Amino acid sequence: MKRGSLVVLEGLDGSGKSTQAAALVQVLLAAGHDVVATREPTDGPYGRRIRAMAASHERVPADELLHWFQADRREHVARVIAPALAAARVVVSDRYYLSSVAYQGALGLDPAEILRQSEAEFPQPDLALLLEIPPSAGLERARSRPDPDEPAFEQREFLERVADIYHRLDRPYLVRIDARGGEAEVHAAVVTALRERLDLLGPGPASAGTRGMRSSAD
Ligand code: TYD
């Protein structure tokens, strides 16, 4: 059976994932693919619950958080990802299970165990693009959003742990992208990785999608 492709973007908040995901979608559309753009946490019931927990500054235990992210992902896969792959579409997701590995791992859970469970349960991505920035840069760009009651050093230490787990990941489908550069430069690296790993763009350089890109950090 012909299966579609699953491309996911991963990285710290403020790494430019969302901007790069949108530009990637444009390139894939221009190449004639039937593309589904999606993200986690989703806008479904579990995703809304996760956002409400974050907004309330509730301290939720790590294992409970992981449970909610996984419930959200289970529904995301069942309703969006698996049907799209079965229909030979190209799915671009802003975050997927490596976010649980890195973020819930940074909260003290075992990253290797989250990875093992996730790979056993969910479709593995054909390509995971890890946008790497120094944690201090992520902190700068995400400063408008964190909990004002939380001391800055905790956020920094947390983000450093997240970045460290991401950095040590080694999967056959994972490609690291240096995301310190400008949008167009990072986009070019994303397109190169896509060309090298998946047969979706055909021959020749693709510069489509670099013009008119949004300039938000994430
Ligand atoms: P984010 O993509 O930043 O969503 P939004 O744009 O709506 O703010 O994700 C929200 C946060 O959720 C982000 O800090 C990473 C975190 N997260 C996890 O901790 N575990 C997960 O499995 C996922 C998908 C996200």
Image (cartoon, grey):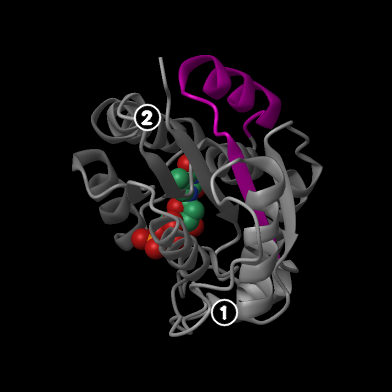
Task: Tell me the mark number nearer the camera, choosing from 2 and 1.
Answer: 2
Give residue 4's quadrant in the image.
top left
Asked whether residue 139 is drawn in magenta, I would say no
Asked whether residue 117 is drawn in magenta, I would say yes
Give residue 200's quadrant in the image.
top right
Residue assigned mark 2: 85
In the rendered image, the vertical position of residue 40 relative to residue 22, given as above or below: above
In the rendered image, the vertical position of residue 45 relative to residue 29, given as above or below: above
Q: Give amino acid for label 1.
A: Arg
Judged from the image, the secondary structure of the residue bearing numbered disc 1 is: helix
Give the extent of the magenta segment.
109-132
Quarter of the figure that contains the N terminus = top left
Residues under labels 2 and 1: Cα distance?
34 Å
Picture coordinates of residue 150, whole percent (x, y)? 53, 68
Judged from the image, the secondary structure of the residue bearing numbered disc 2 is: helix
Picture coordinates of residue 178, whole percent (x, y)? 76, 65
The answer to whether marks 2 and 1 mark residues whose Cβ atoms lie closer than 8 Å is no
In primary-sequence order, the first of circles 2 and 1 is: 2
In the rendered image, the vertical position of residue 27 relative to residue 92, given as above or below: below
Residue drawn at (43%, 82%) of the image: 214
Please tell me the numbered disc located at residue 141. 1
Front position in the image: 13 or 157: 13
Camera sees residue 107: no
Q: For disc 1, does the CB lie below 8 Å from ligand 1?
A: no
Residue drawn at (41%, 42%) of the image: 90
Front position in the image: 52 or 8: 8
